[in-house]
Amino acid sequence: MTAQPRKMSEIMKEMSERLLRHPSEVPSSEAAHVALFFANAAWNESVGLGDSREGYRNVWETIEAENPELWNEFKSNDINAMIDELIQYKKNHYPDDQRRILLCGISDGKVRVEWLKAAAPGVDSRWEMQLYGLVRIGDREQAIRFLQETRGMSNKEAAKRVAAVAAELGIK
């Protein structure tokens, strides 16, 4: 019998708390969100989605501009070092967990994570994440165009594939 993997929300909370100066205290909303962004970026980078770090830069820079005291809640203000630390933590504690995070955030005070299983052998993980991301945000037309452009599918084939992805994500 195979053990069930830990809930991704628990892992993300655990990883994000490692970045806080006082992890046992309740952080500000901004610090909690930024720490979670860093944990998400580190996780995805560790499973081969290397552009995550840069993709989040505009988010934490915007939050930082609104709350410059934010870094007082972190044990460091060296963002790259903190993300590198989390990547190492993931590799040490969850080396075989290759799930990819599609969506990660805080809703009603709880960490919420939507993830995809590890990419199948031969599947372009970045391509797949782009497709699932477009479907997840509700941009089916763009997802269909994406499939037509990158896989040469007809409109009908692409629409069928997008519908299948939506069903897999539990989106009607």
Image (spheres, rainbow, N blue to C red):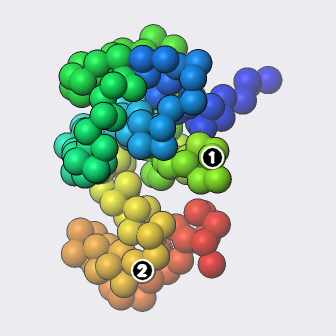
| Cβ atoms at labels 1 and 2 below 8 Å apart | no
- Residue 81, position in %: x, y? 24, 19
Q: Nearer the viewer, residue 115 or 60?
A: 60
Query: Which is more foreground, mark 1 or mark 2?
Result: 1
47 to the left or right of 148: right
Question: Mark 1 sits on what residue?
Answer: 109
Residue found at x 63% / y 46%:
109
Q: What amino acid is at disc 1?
A: Gly
Mark 2 Cα within 10 Å, few/some/many (few <14, many 20+)? some
Q: Residue sitting at 48 percent across and 38 percent down? A: 28
Mark 1 vs mark 2: which is more N-terminal?
1
Please name the residue that numbered disc 2 is placed on: 140
The kind of secondary structure element at disc 1 is loop
Can you give x and y, in whole percent of width and height, for residue 149 in the image? 22, 75
Q: Amino acid at mark 2?
A: Arg
Q: Compared with residue 85, is residue 155 higher up or lower down, i.e. above or below?
A: below
Task: Determine the CA span between mark 1 and mark 2.
Answer: 30 Å
Residue at the image position 73 percent from the left and 24 percent from the top: 3
**How far from the left and from the top, in percent, is residue 67?**
31, 44
Give residue 140's quadrant in the image.
Answer: bottom left
Q: Looking at the image, is 133 positioned above or below residue 104? A: below
Rendered-image quadrant of the C terminus: bottom right
Q: In which quarter of the view is residue 14 placed?
A: top right
Split into 4 quadrants, where in the image is the N terminus? Answer: top right
Q: Local crowd at mark 1 within 10 Å, few (<14), some, or many (≥20)?
A: few
